[in-house]
Amino acid sequence: MELISPTELAKQKVQAVQDYTLLAIRSIGNIFRKPLYLADMLQQADLIGVGSLPIVVLIGFFTGAVLAVQTANTLQRFGSITLIGQLVSLSMVRELGPVLTGILVAGRNASGMASELGSMIVTEQIDAMRALGTDPMKKLVTPRVTATVFMLFFLTIISDFVGLAGGLMVAKLLLNLDARQYWSNAWQSLVFEDVFMGLVKPVLFGFIISTVGCFYGMTARGGTQGVGRATTQAVVTASVLIIVTNFFVTQFLMNVLSYK
């Protein structure tokens, strides 16, 4: 690893933030310019959404089940075991559903975007696109950003639902609770603020995942080793940004939605 001065390191980080911000802005602006490359958007939606569906369903189901198992003993001490549906629904919809789905999609797709675009950079395919008059940002980045934001929204909804189903399985089979009472508590406990918070987050997370993955892919240098580094950095950065953004978004929305 090459040693550089702290000043140069700081300059590189500031330059990276600037380049990422520019890429993110251009990816949004390209949505309103023709051509739209709808076929590419549909292809990416299939790869990102349908491809991630099995693991999202599996993780969501067992997350809801684990929530029910872990909280059952605590609720039983206070004689409130019937509120387990309320606890699972609030936890999944507000926090665990969006965050876990975002991290799973980041691990699967941010790395894929970085490696795919990085390989195109290394093999000079991006330069060939520019020579032919095609904007790589619009052709490669915007469809991925649009598809990720759109599909992560629905993947989160599916994760929330199967998480509630996992909690129902534990409540019915292990705790001998009434299924109708579980669903009644789960749905009635949710208010507009909870659902709004749970559906805003996947939009932001999807934008972070796609732009980070594309940024590291488009800036990959150094041959195959550079592509490997870009892939790793994309997953780590996207996951960290999701966790950090989740905190600030939660705090902001709680302050805004509670203000009357």
Image: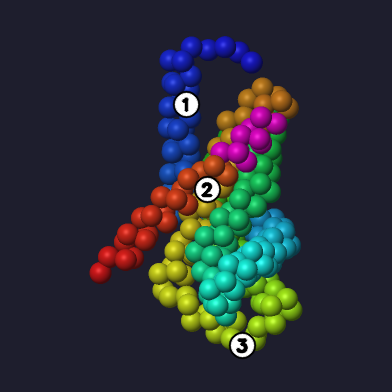
Q: Position of residue 21 (x, y in %)?
A: 44, 38
Task: Decide if residue 257 is on the left or right side of residue 216.
Answer: left
In the image as oriented, which residue stretches furthest toward the front? 77
What distance separates the C-alpha of mark 2 from that of mark 1?
19 Å
Tell me the kind of residue under disc 2: Ile
Relative image position of residue 260 (x, y in whole percent): 25, 69
According to the image, label 3 marks what residue?
180
**In the image, residue 175 lies at what x, y percent?**
69, 78
**Was residue 54 drawn as part of the magenta stretch in this picture?**
no
Image quarter in which the N terminus is found: top right
Q: Which numbered disc, 2 or 1, marks the residue closer to the eye?
A: 2
- How many numbered discs sit on the rendered protein? 3
Which callout, 3 or 1, points at the residue further toward the start of the chain? 1
**Residue at the far left in the pictured view:** 260
Q: Nearer the viewer, mark 3 or mark 1?
A: 3
For badge 3, the amino acid type reads: Arg
Q: Which residue is located at x 55 percent, y 77 percent? A: 79
Q: Residues within 10 Å of mark 2 (few under 14, many from 20)?
A: many
Taking the image as drawn, is residue 189 in sight? yes
Instruction: Please state the horizontal and vertical placement of residue 215, each as a whole percent of the image.
Output: 55, 37
Which amino acid type corresponds to the residue marked 1 in the rendered image? Lys
Question: Is 235 inside the magenta-drawn segment?
Answer: yes
Q: Which of 63 and 137 lies nearest the eye of the viewer?
A: 63
Task: Please give the residue where the numbered disc 2 appears in the rendered image.
Answer: 242
The main secondary structure of the magenta stretch is helix
Element type at mark 3: helix
Up/down of 65 relative to 47, above or below? below
**Disc 1 marks which residue?**
13
**Range of the magenta residues?**
228-237
The residue lying at 66 percent from left, 46 percent from top is 107
Precedes in sequence: disc 2 or disc 1: 1
Nearer the camera: disc 3 or disc 2? 3
